[in-house]
Image: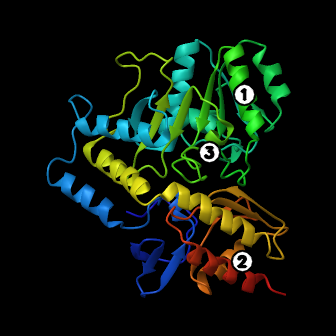
Amino acid sequence: MELFDVYPLMDVTPVSGNGCYVTDEQGTEYLDLYGGHAVISIGHSHPHYVKRISDQLEKIGFYSNSVINPLQQEFARKLGELSGLNAYNLFLCNSGAEANENALKLASFTTGKKRVIAFDKAFHGRTSAAVSVTDNVRIQANINKGMDVSFLPLNEAGLVEEELKSGDVCAVIIEGIQGIGGVQIPKDSFLKELEQLCKKYDCKLILDEIQSGYGRSGKFFAFQYADIKPDIITTAKGMANGFPIGGVLINPDIEARHGMLGATFGGNYLACAAGLAVLEVMESEALIRNAAETGEFLLSELGKIDGIKEVRGRGLMIGLEFDSEVAGLRKKLVKEEHIFTGVSSTNIIRLLPPLSLTVEQATVFTKALGRLLAP
């Protein structure tokens, strides 16, 4: 059997990782400024993380959600404490797409409506409902095209209200910071207006923090810059440093009932152990503050480099837009400078490093990029 060939791959085979670095089978070390799509939050192979999972595996690795699992309660309490959202309730699943599926389902359950408002360049996942609210017809099969979705431009509250007036919208879904869309940041004032409009027209505001959440923006969730309280928040990528997990944070105004949602593997022992390890390290090593400070340094230094059209982002979620395609530049960063980066569309380099990235490591990148862009 061969693998189904759907992924364009870098010509690198990592065999180990440590902190912000990965090492290939030839012994070459690479500075990882992509974190496997923003997944590596506390650094590769963090010793506390490894021990937490190993210790748990020696006790019990899995049972379904038909028994009491105290780690789920411990995880929910710790997440509420660090995020400042103690009043919310937590549903655990396995991925970001699954989190968004459940968020959309909750919004429809509780409002009795079915239309969704999403935004231009949005990415919310590849499964049925999630891909329907993703602004990319290339990854939508015909089976995904029956959902009633209206796509609107970011930061146009008046257009949102015009759609909401029809009374058939169950949810407005928006990323805290658009990732695939090119690191586009909704205005804080726009998020405040969305909160007010959703209350006015009886629909649910869903904040997709799958990529922008978990400290990446310099706050626990990117929407917290706008000082709002969404109805539903989804999270996944940074939650367990690589162990599959997803979460839906649900405003206490939404009531649960048995059978409303479900997931066989969601919130299993190993996932909770991994998730707790991440939160414990984030707290003990002050990684959210580090993301804010190192991110501010990067944004400042990158803004000084000639050849970059625009630098934007918050914390350690940064986009570098160029006037031309960046494929060649990214290959040079890997082959010549041994640095991993990500991409959005064809002309934007995306930086999503571990939250533990230091100023010294960030400087390695800015100097390398400066060299490659020098005339």
Mark 3, other Cα within 10 Å: few <14 / some 14–19 / many ≥20: many
Tag 3 residue = 222
Question: Label 2 vs label 1: CA separation?
Answer: 40 Å
Residue shown at the point (51%, 61%) measured from the top left: 355
Q: Can you tell which mark lies on residue 328?
A: 2
- The answer to which of marks 3 and 2 sits earlier in the sequence is 3
Relative image position of residue 111 (x, y in whole percent): 58, 13
Under mark 1, the amino acid is Leu
Q: Nearer the viewer, residue 207 or 2?
A: 207
Residue shown at the point (81%, 67%) measured from the top left: 322
The quadrant in which the C terminus is found is bottom right
Residue shown at the point (30%, 34%) measured from the top left: 73
Q: Could you say whether the residue bearing mark 2 is in a helix, strand or loop?
A: helix
Left or right: where does residue 2 sit relative to residue 147?
A: left
Under mark 2, the amino acid is Gly
State which quadrant residue 343 falls in.
bottom right
Tag 1–tag 3 contact (CB < 8 Å): no
Q: Nearer the viewer, mark 3 or mark 2?
A: 3
- The answer to which of marks 1 and 3 sits earlier in the sequence is 1
